[in-house]
Amino acid sequence: MPLLPLTGHESARSLVAGAVKTDRLPRTLLISGPPGIGKQRFALWVAQLLMCVDPGEEPCGQCPPCRKVLGLAHADLHWFVPIPRPKATDPDKAVEEAEKTLAELMADRRDNPLWTAPDGMASHAVASARLLLRKAALTSVEGGSKVFIIGDAERLVPQESSPEAANALLKIIEEPPRATYFILTASDPGRLLPTIRSRAVPLRLGALRPEQVGAFLAEYAKDDGAGSAHRSQSSRGSIGSALADSGSTTKAHEAATALLAAIVDPKGAPYELALKQRPWEARGEFSSMLEALAETLGNAARQRTLHDKPVKIGGTRLAADTGALVRAISQVEKARETAQGNVNPQLLLAVLAGDLEEVLCD
Ligand SMILES: [Zn+2]
């Protein structure tokens, strides 16, 4: 699957297109801006523009180099994203491991071009820097420009263990080899190594407009119109945050459905399920789960009233009548209030599971 189109950033696009046309694009760019607004996608767009055989205000999108960039299959496009630190201690083996991990990630992105923020522990460790140096030393495969994208460049570690790799990286970013471009992206350029920041020309991208986020979600995020409208309003102009929110909403609904199914299933074990919940990473996650629980019960109550037949939750028949469902909702609401205080979420959920079982199953 090719990359999804770049959304927004019209003025930055025309700035870059003008610079490419007159061959004045800085060889080392630092693209900054809020998380999830498409900085790396913008960097890929710049790479496509540099490699396109007939670039105008936009890359043509049809020529072989354009197609290769869109398919993340251009031999002269090197996209570095943060990865887990390689396990190998031998430097050459670590570089091979980094190369394999990056190739796997790129294969993932070809399959699913909607990506979210990398794992908190992932970084551009010294093996990635060495791999980049090796690739930069090779001549261009296709004979045109070579582009290196370093996403989340704040995660470039200082590499005290290998000052020579660190210095070589600084030198190459300062004076890129012929026809080679470096495009770094960072949400928090203040956290970049100052030695790196001082060597790049900054380009700041702003948040997207809510309607741009909404149109993108409606088109590409397999979402109903109402959901994407709501999410685009709360996304602060960031497609990435809208996608991350939908991920946690889905998780909350799955957890709520699993708990209700265990409550109404005679063989279910709701207490165990409640107590075995992994610790919620944030209070917000627990309250979204309670919210999802209230919403699921609310939907069940509406269906029960409209169709007058038992509804199914997670494949289990829920025999409770509308009155019982409404009492169940008020139990969840009470738990939501209690959750505002200093309580243990697992215990609160176990108590709630018991209350719900009494209301829904007698
Ligand atoms: Zn083209």
Image (tube, rainbow, N blue to C red):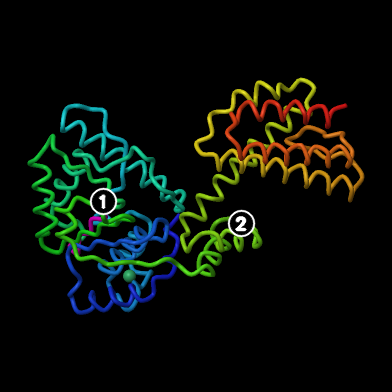
To which quarter of the image does residue 277 belong? top right
Give percent across and percent down for residue 289: 63, 40
In the image, 114 versus 120, the foreground residue is 120
Which one is closest to the eye, mark 1 or mark 2? 1
Give percent across and percent down for residue 165: 11, 42
Asked if ligand 1 lies within 8 A of label 2, the reply is: no
In the image, 268 versus 132, the foreground residue is 268
* Type of secondary structure dominating the magenta stretch: strand
SS at circle 1: helix
SS at circle 2: loop
**Amino acid type, callout 1:** Arg
Considering only vertical position in the picture, is 149 above or below 253? below
Residue in the picture at 89% in, 48% down: 305
The reply to whether the magenta stretch includes residue 309 is: no
Q: Sequence-wise, which precedes: disc 1 or disc 2?
A: 1
Give percent across and percent down for residue 161: 13, 34
Residue in the picture at 48% in, 59% down: 239
Residue 223: numbered disc = 2
Reading the image, the residue beneath label 1 is 191
The reply to whether the magenta stretch includes residue 146 is: yes
Q: Residue furthest right?
A: 308
Q: How many marks?
A: 2
Considering only vertical position in the picture, is 350 above or below 186? above
The residue segment tinted magenta is: 143-150
Mark 2 packing: few (<14 Cα in 10 Å), some, or many (20+)?
Answer: few
